[in-house]
Every structure is written in C-alpha cells, then in structure tokens.
Amino acid sequence: MDIEKIIAEMSIEEKAQLLTGFEGKTKGFEKWGIEPVWMVDGPHGVRKGKSNTEGGCVCFPTSSAIGASWSREVAFKTGEAIGRECRQEDYEMLLAPGVNMKRTPYCGRNFEYFSEDPVLSGHLAAEVINGLESQGIGASLKHYAANNQEYERTTINAEVDERTLREYYLKAFQVALENSKPTSVMCAYNKLGGIWCSENKYLLTEILRDEWGYDGIVVSDWGAVHNACKSIRAGLDLDMPCNKNIASDVKKGLENGEITIEEIDRSVRRMLEFIDRTKKMQKGKCQYSREAQHEAAKKAAEECITLLKNDDDVLPITAKKCKKIGVFGRAAERPVIMGAGSSAILLDDEKIDKPLDFIKKNAAEAGIEVYYSPVAATTFAGGFMGAEDVGELNGWSQGNDFDAMILFVSDNYGLDVETEHWDRENLTFSNYLNGMVESACNACDNVIVVMQTGSAAIPGRWRERVKGVIQMWYAGEAGGSAVADILFGKVNPSAKLSESFANCDRTEMDVSGDGRKTWYNEGMFVGYRYYDKNKDKIWFPFGHGLSYTKFEYSDLQLSSKKSDGENIGLTVSFKVKNVGDMAGKEAVQLYVSHKNSVVLKPEKELKAFDKIELLPGEEKEVSFELNKKDFEYYNICLREWHAESGKYAILIGASSADIRLSGEYEIAYESDYSIDTLSTKYLQMQES
Ligand code: GLC
C-alpha cells in the first residue's frame, strides 16, 4: 500500500470517512484497493458469528478466570483459540483483551478483566494478544484508562493521583504493550482528571505514544467521542461505531482552525498503516472443529477453576471416601458461564457442559450414588429457611445420608448481576442460597461449595462451616466438565486467585462517586495492597489456591549484576519440589517490598510470576531476572520513574499471604535520591 500516495490523492471527505466506522468495520476504498477491517467483541470469544456455526461460537473462560490460571501458556492458547474463531467467522480484529484494574469487586465488568494486579494482568493480556496474532488476528487493548466502574461510565470523571495512575491503573497497559503489539488500543468512555479519555492528549499521545512508543491506532469505545476534532488532535484515530457527521466536523474544524490538515493526515496515516498491517497478518480460514475448540475451552477452564479450601482432604471425591453424594443448586444443571453485555456470546444451550451431567458420569465410573435437587427458589421464598425445612424439602434429613454434599451457588441468575452498564449491588449470595448451604452444614459433615461468580464474592455464615470451597468463576461453556474432573480428581487444580476475596465490604472507598466524579481516595491500596494492612478483612488472599499435591520451596539465591558501580539487575533463583503423590502445577510469585522508602508504598508488590509443572518427587529450579524498572516508583516532582537506593526484600510466595522464601537486595547509587538529593535534583530541573 503506497500510503503517502493515497494520502496525497484523498479528499478531505475521504480522509474523514477513514477515521470512523461503518457497521462494525472500517471504511473500504475500492479505488485504492483498501478493504474494510472487520472487528468483533469480545474477551472470551466471538460474540456473534457470520457463518452461523452450528450451535454458535465457542464461549471460553472469561478473563477473570484466565487471570486465576496464572499461566502465560493458558492465556496464549486461549487467544490462539479465539483467533481461530475469528478466522472461522471472517473477523480480523478482536475487541479485547480488557485490562482495567478491579478497584472494587462491585464493578459489573470485572469478569472481563484479569486481575487486581497490573503485572499479572499485563502479562496475561500480552499473551492473549500474542495468541490472537499467531492466528493473524488483531487485538484492541481496552479500556484506556481508569474505567473501573459501570455506574455512569459515560459521564464519570475519575480523579486519580499521578502515582496511583502511573504505578497502578496504567501499569497493566504498559506491561501489555511491552510484551505484545496489539493493532489497537481502545480509549475509555470516562473522563480522567476532568478530560474525556477520547480527547485526552496526556493519555493518548504523551504517555501512550511519546513515552511508551505505541505505534498502532487508538479506537474509541462505542460512542466515546464527543468532539471529532479534539479527539483527532489528542491522538485518537478511529471514531466507532460511526460518526455520520465526521466529514462536516473535520471541514468545520479546518475552517475555524480547531484542527490542521497535518493532524488529520497523521491519523489517516496511522489508519492506513493499521489496515495494511491487519490485512498482511490475515491467515484466512483455518481447519475448524467446534469440538476441538470446545476441548480447548475445557483445557483452559481446568487451569482456571480454583480450589480455595479443602479441609480434611474432603476433595477429591473418591469411592474410598464416598458411597453416596448429594448435589444441590440450580447452577449444577444451569451453570452461569459468562456475564452480560457486549462480551456475551450467542451460543446454544446444548453446547454448554452441565456440571451435574459430568458429576454423574464420573460418579458412575467410581460406583458412587448421586442424588440431585435444584433447591428451587420457591423452597426459600421470601428468605432464609430453617435446616429442617430445607432437609425435608430436599430429600436430606438430619444425619449423614450423604457422605458429601456439593452445593452450587451463583450470583447471576438471568438477572444480569455481573454485566456491562451496571455495577453489582452486593457481593453476597442470595438468602436462599446461603440458607441452602447452612442447612446442608446441619445435615452433613462434608459440605463443598462451588461458586460461580465473575468476580470476588463475600461468603455467607457458612464460611467456617464448609470443608471445601471451589471458585469456578465464569468458566465458559466447558467449565461444567472441567469442574467435575477436578471434583473427582481426574484433574489436579492449579489455579490461584487473581483478586482478593474479602469477608466484608470496604466501606471507606468512594466506590462509584456521584455519577459525575469519583475520587480514588484509596490510592493504589487496592486488593492485596490494602489487605496486607487489613488482614482481618480477608477471606482468601490474592494468589491463593490449593492443589491435591504439595509443593516445597527452597534454596533462594540472589545475584546482582552491576555495571559502572550501579546495580542494574538481579537474578533470583529458587527450587520448587512436588512432595506429594500427584502430578501438579504451581504458580510461583515474586514480590518486592521496600519498607524504608522516602515515599508511601504498598507493603509488597508482585513483580514476576511463573507456572511450573512437577511430577511427584520432581524438583525444578525457577529463575527470574529483575531489572531497575522492577524497583522503581513514579516520582511526581521529577516526573520520572526512580529506583530509590536502599534495602529491598525479595519475597517468593505460594500466595501473597504465604511467603515461603525471602532475601534482601540493596540498591546503592552515588546519585541517591534521598530527601536532600531529591530536592537538589528538583532545583536543577527548575533552573534547566
Ligand atoms: C462497548 C464496550 C466495549 C466493546 C464495544 C463494542 O460499549 O465498552 O468493551 O468492545 O462497546 O461493542
């Protein structure tokens, strides 16, 4: 494509038309051989196919579940598989992944986001993008930035301090862009610091392009542009879904000096480069099998479903432990596999694996009897019922008729509880579900709760009474068979929480503001960064997840690399051994803690992670390379990132609350930015 020639030949109208969409695609121009680029939602699959694939497109685990996999491989393979869906349906760019931080579990779209931590989110998003690209499909990293609630998302102004913005809310975008090349970044609806993200030059040009070197296009969220000329000037290129007045807007802007032709051509050039790159990436139709894609969704779900509690090794269910089990709750036969909104996949119900079907199959193989009841809402009409009512109505009496009881609970019953456009009203389960679990605890010693939620939930009074807890997330269409294989030990669970599960609300946050502005008064003390200081409020911590085997960590080694007197890096290595009798995978986590900093910092922050597979008795060495950036904070006076000299703790954790190994690393600079040096440097800046 001879881009400069095309720009020279294009009229103003044609240039303007290239900067907006037409029914979900960009504009084509036959005379220059420019084909439209087709784009489609969303993060866990193709929302609606064009080829009417029998049964609809495949629904993969949502991003919050992928986050719990802690696996770059799972993220890549999921991106790759969704890329095949796009090829099958003739789409060229997927409007995903989303990397917004989970400021609170109330955000309705948290199921579409990976984690409360920007490093975990950024790396997993990068792998989804790389997986898509391996299939020749573009991506749209979204929603840039500080789109952390659905309440009044198109009018809210997010008031975020600069350090929190840089070190937390933008960090996931920065990490993703350091590790992948998405064809687009999607700007968010909201305002940041009082300026629409769609016309925020600081975000779209100064940070995204000038600092981070991003060279793709910026696409607006659907209807997020308020003024075409201001958006183009700020660095936005594609106004979606369609601005029918863009030609007149641009012409008027040129006439009244609101925009220059150079600014228009800059976006036209980026659009032509985007189209050229996207078309060259295409790989055309692939060998497509819906069954194989469903199997890929199951493999992913197996690594996302998280075992949170397993007292007395109540799981896995085996013939040795159980002769008869009870399964309860409608979510066992009608699992909630995703949230609502633009990410929702239109697929046929019969493509969805029902947990109950696969529990029955696995139980029959083991010679275990299964009893099931949906415990319909009518049983508990109007609120909490007593155990005897529940026991009576649902076939279980006092005493242990069942060797184990598995209760499926969900927060989304066709009520769109976790959805785009709205935030959650509460984080607990309904009275009748909590009542069902409590009643089961009165009737059986071995109660296992399987939760289906897109984001963190707060437990009922059964929290301490149940022996087993599994977080299924929104595990996609194959989550039902995956959870059954985990329940019966055919699959060893290896997932860990990508967001904190608290046992009560945070009441001090200005969670969603007044609809016009919300103040992020908690700073970056979100998730484990907050619960590290408020341990009493946590149910299960960030990074927590159990296995049916056990892992031991040992032999931490730190070796720093120096050049001309400055520490420029650190190699961290340690060993992990599977000391159990079952093969398993372990997500290992590296946190850095700097207690005596001159500025306020979280107690510790995730800097690296990996997931390793070990056979029984096998031991592997894990090694991470840290560099200066891993020790930096953003200094708002120097307006740059800075690694303060001092002693840092290097913490190796099985979770954020289960540190297995620790060591100390000292950064020593001649030009130490201690208070006096900082102010000297600042004065120099003023003079320069
Ligand atoms: C929606 C969403 C965005 C989606 C787009 C297209 O409003 O915010 O995530 O990709 O519009 O449906």
Image: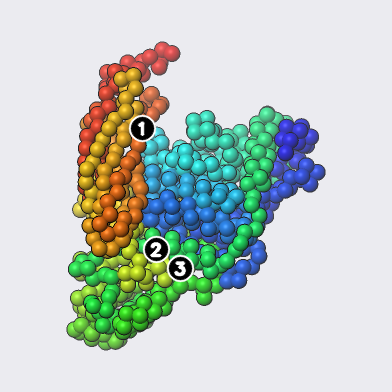
The part of the image, by quadrant, that contains residue 451 is bottom left
What residue type is disc 1 on? Asn
What residue type is disc 3 on? Ala
The residue lying at 21 percent from left, 37 percent from top is 663
The answer to which of 268 and 651 lies nearer the viewer is 651
The answer to which of 548 and 460 lies nearer the viewer is 548
**Where is residue 258 shown, x and y percent of the image?**
65, 31
**Spatial separation of the CA atoms under disc 3 and disc 2:** 9 Å
The answer to whether residue 245 is above or below residue 547 is: above
Q: Which residue is mark 1?
A: 627
Q: Residues within 10 Å of mark 3 (few under 14, many from 20)?
A: many
Q: Which residue is mark 3?
A: 478
The residue lying at 29 percent from left, 80 percent from top is 325
The answer to whether residue 297 is above or below residue 590 is: below
Circles 1, 2 touching at the beta carbon (< 8 Å): no
The residue lying at 39 percent from left, 63 percent from top is 302
